[in-house]
Image (cartoon, grey):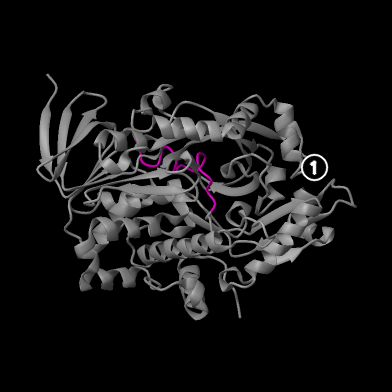
């Protein structure tokens, strides 16, 4: 007979990825006596979207990702989203530096490394766009130190692989930002959970899947099944956070909160070409992002990407998108079908009809032959040889579909936090630039779901201690930006801009 138990706690976190780890650590710093139960279906932390092979891994600071700086109809470049993401990443670095400086988590060398962030384009139209983007970004000190060039020789010094074998008369342009980083969110997440597990009143339960959640008498009752011995536990708490990556949507729909109505998900799988030739890997030291092909989704922007995974330098190219009906790598092929409910079917159908080019794009990507994949790589690395690369499966992303008054349903490409009006439950949906902006996202969530405590002098003081720029917009304060970057750079062993 399987055991049945009930346990009261203060906070239940579903999913052991970067979001839950960040929220748990923030709450424990703000209130050391808070009781937290963390439930994860798999047998280890950060095994899905937060893992290095599964996610984008770039410390997204909007230095190189062109989809964050769209060109407007009048030809000007909108950098507002880039500014917001750059600020958010500075907030993440401050929190990590605070944890490292106070010996809460282990040394940063294992999870963050400096690496230049570059954009690279070819063709008159794209070159003109990149030049305008560079000029516009120079108006904001967050992007100070960015270099721009159309000179073949200089770009070849920066990234030899990208220029070797290219036609001498091809019009190309690149920007380079030395302040870029590579972040291994899998390692960071595991470091955070290792520190949390050693704290009082924090319990991590692996191989535990959530079967149901219901609100009774102002508390959430979360039913959890141990996947091995079938013990059924009920966890009871006034606050629940669903940070289960692609698994968040089905759980949010189970909660039946009015705010969840109309939300749907569109799963997209990813693949990388992974370089297997050490000599080639050694010749490239940058994250080089290009422009997305017309009609392709923003998360498919190709990049030739240097990373450190398990302490070893790697080189990846991709991602190639794919069509799937699973919400997680370890999910079920029925995930998509099961997520369709009466409340969201209209939004799902409208978003589907309006995004036919995306669906066609994904199906075309699935049908890519190895030669076609190599062709895409050769646009960035003309001399690439097939035998130096192997195909690796990346993580799964679930893009958010939500109700839209005029259009029925729209597909969202960002990260979305959905919370109940009373703040008792919140779920994180969506993908990029999620992990890099996790700290900002979770601070906003704390303010929304713990409003009284968040306003208290005690919590305000602690937030300012952990994040020196807390409450101040970095894009308006150059001196503060420099001060913050100096501190985080020193603690985390990153590049500095010298004045």
Coordinates of residue 424 in the picture (x, y in percent): 21, 49
10 Å neighbourhood of mark 1: few (<14), some, or many (≥20)?
some
Residue lying at the far right in this picture: please name it: 169
Write down the residue under mark 1.
382
Coordinates of residue 241 in the picture (x, y in percent): 28, 46
Please indicate, yes or no, whether residue 398 appears anywhere in the rendered image: yes
Observer-nearest of 139 and 165: 139
The span picked out in magenta is 44-58
Is residue 53 part of the magenta span, yes or no? Answer: yes
Coordinates of residue 470 in the picture (x, y in percent): 37, 70
Give the side of residue 88 with respect to residue 254, left or right: right
Residue at 68%, 42% in the rendered image: 293
Give the side of residue 363 with respect to residue 406, left or right: right
Q: Looking at the magenta stretch, what is its main secondary structure?
A: loop
Is residue 117 part of the magenta span, yes or no? Answer: no
Residue at 90%, 52% in the rendered image: 169
Residue lying at the far front in this picture: please name it: 406
Coordinates of residue 151 in the picture (x, y in percent): 82, 61
Where is the N terminus found, in terms of image quarters? Answer: top left
Quadrant of the image occupied by residue 370: top right
Residue at 72%, 53% in the rendered image: 120
Residue at 42%, 43% in the rendered image: 405
Please indicate, yes or no, whether residue 160 appears anywhere in the rendered image: no
């Amino acid at each position: 007979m399987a055991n049945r138990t009930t346990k009261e706690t203060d906070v239940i976190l579903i999913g052991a990825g970067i979001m839950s780890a960040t929220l748990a650590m923030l709450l424990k710093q703000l209130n050391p006596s808070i009781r937290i139960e963390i439930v994860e279906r798999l047998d280890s932390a950060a095994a899905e979207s937060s893992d290095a092979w599964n996610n984008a891994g770039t410390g997204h600071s909007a230095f190189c990702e062109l989809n964050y700086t769209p060109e407007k109809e009048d030809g000007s470049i909108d950098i507002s989203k880039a500014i917001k993401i750059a600020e958010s990443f500075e907030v993440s670095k401050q929190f990590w530096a605070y944890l490292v400086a106070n010996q809460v988590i282990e040394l940063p060398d294992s999870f963050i490394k400096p690496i230049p962030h570059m954009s690279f384009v070819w063709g008159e139209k794209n070159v003109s766009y990149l030049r305008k983007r560079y000029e516009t970004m120079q108006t904001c000190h967050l992007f100070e130190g960015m270099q721009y060039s159309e000179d073949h020789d200089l770009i070849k010094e920066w990234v030899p692989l990208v220029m070797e074998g290219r036609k001498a008369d091809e019009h190309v342009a690149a920007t380079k930002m030395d302040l870029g980083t590579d972040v291994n969110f899998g390692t960071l997440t595991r470091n955070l959970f290792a520190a949390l597990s050693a704290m009082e009143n924090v319990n991590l339960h692996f191989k535990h899947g959530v079967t149901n959640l219901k609100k009774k008498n102002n508390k959430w009752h979360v039913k959890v099944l141990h996947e091995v011995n079938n013990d059924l536990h009920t966890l009871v708490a006034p606050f629940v956070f669903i940070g289960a990556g692609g698994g968040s949507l089905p759980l949010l729909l189970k909660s039946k909160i009015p705010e969840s109505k109309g939300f749907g998900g569109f799963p997209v799988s990813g693949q990388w070409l992974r370089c297997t030739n050490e000599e080639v890997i050694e010749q490239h030291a940058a994250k080089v992002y290009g422009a997305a092909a017309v009609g392709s989704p923003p998360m498919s922007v190709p990049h030739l990407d240097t990373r450190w995974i398990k302490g070893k330098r790697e080189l990846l190219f991709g991602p190639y998108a794919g069509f799937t009906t699973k919400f997680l790598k370890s999910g079920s092929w029925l995930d998509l079908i099961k997520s369709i409910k009466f409340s969201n079917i209209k939004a799902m159908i409208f978003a589907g009809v309006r995004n036919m080019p995306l669906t066609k794009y994904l199906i075309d990507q699935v049908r890519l032959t190895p030669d076609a994949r190599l062709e895409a790589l050769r646009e960035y690395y003309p001399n690439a040889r097939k035998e130096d690369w192997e195909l690796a499966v990346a993580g799964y992303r679930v893009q958010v579909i939500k109700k839209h008054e005029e259009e029925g349903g729209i597909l969202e490409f960002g990260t979305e936090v959905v919370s109940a009006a009373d703040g008792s439950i919140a779920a994180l949906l969506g993908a990029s630039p999620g992990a890099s902006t996790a700290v900002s996202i979770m601070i906003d969530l704390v303010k929304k779901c713990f409003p009284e405590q968040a306003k208290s002098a005690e919590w305000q003081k602690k937030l300012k201690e952990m994040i020196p720029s807390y409450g101040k917009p970095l894009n308006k304060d150059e001196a503060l930006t420099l001060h913050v970057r100096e501190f985080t750079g020193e603690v985390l062993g990153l590049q500095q801009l010298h004045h």
